[in-house]
Image (spheres, rainbow, N blue to C red):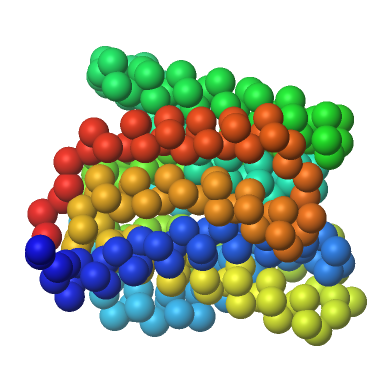
Amino acid sequence: MTTAQPSQFTGYAAAWSIVFVWSFWLIVSRVASGSGLTIYDLAAMRYGLASIIAVPLSLYYKPWRGLSLVQIAVISFILGPIYILCVFSGFLYAPAAHGGIFMNGLLPLISLGFGLALFKARPSPRQLFGGALILISAVVLARDGAALISPDAWIGDLLFVIGAVFFSSYVILSERWSITAMQVIFCGTVVNAVLYLPIWVLFLPSGLADAPTGPLILQAIYQGFVPNLIGLIFIAHASRTIGNANTSSILAGVPGVGALLGVLILQEPLSPLGIMALVLLTVGLLISVRRRRPVAV
């Protein structure tokens, strides 16, 4: 019986860490409105606090080298305020579980659509079957959320889908352009901080001054540093050591873990039909991602 090499062990550990990092981010973002912070404050934390680390790294590595102005502008826009404000707005209407379902869960389906529309890449039967399972489960979960939680939950679901479209565009372009992790940090954090923070300070509503200390610290740490810096490093390490296929398969657990945490921590309702649809969604994700070839280690 063979055992995993140390590098593979750390790769699997990094991939599973990301599942919990993203799943807890769903919970933290869902409860943000109760802290008195606005969605504009959360976006400012995401870009501004992360820049404390991102700016020195960018000055050292100079990641703008090798990128054209068009590439910098496109990646910065895709990962910019429109994307993240749609996502944060979604949590005002829909439960945390729906964030994982409609952002992470729909990524393979949206990527198939982009591939077919832009690059004439015809999906395989496996991809079509996995995509069909994802679509059916998403529709069922959307109806379940509207019935159990709020008739306006569909608004949040739609905003999450818009966020997924943005993120799927980033995934496709980063692969096509061979964007490095440091280039993502530079475009997604530093450039957007320079553009967004002055607008936030001068024109956008803020609850920063009145927010309780505990929730403020939680949101600052998680929105500012965890998903977009630590998460990015973990994903890069997992992809290098265990390959994209294994990493993607593990990350397919985000919707399920997010839904479970929503039930346990936030007492968000999930019906038996919703549980069945969530299982179907996970199966569809696994079918969709297993086709990917691992990257060279």
Q: Position of residue 297 (x, y in %)?
A: 11, 60
Q: 90 or 238: which is nearer to us?
A: 238
Q: Residue furthest right?
A: 210
Percent from the top left, x then y, of residue 280?
51, 31
- Total labels drawn: 0
Residue that appears at 27% across and 50% down: 246
* Outermost residue to the front: 1
41 or 125: nearer the viewer: 125
Left or right of 155? Residue 103 is: left
Measured as percent of width and height from the top left, residue 159 is found at 67, 37
Question: What residue is drawn where x is 57% and y is 27%?
Answer: 137
Camera-nearest residue between 36 and 139: 139
Quick check: can you spot residue 36?
yes
Q: Depth check: 274 or 170 in front? A: 274
Residue depicted at 46% across the width and 19% down the height: 132
Q: Is residue 198 above or below residue 153?
A: below
Q: Say which quadrant the N terminus sits in.
A: bottom left
- Occupied quadrant, residue 149: top right
Instruction: Write down the quadrant of residue 231 in the picture.
Output: bottom left
What residue is drawn where x is 47% and y is 58%? 19
Q: Is 161 rendered above or below residue 133? A: below
Visible residue check, residue 86: no
Q: Position of residue 163 (x, y in %)?
A: 57, 40
Left or right, 96 with respect to 17, comes to right
- Say whether residue 271 is left or right of residue 261: right
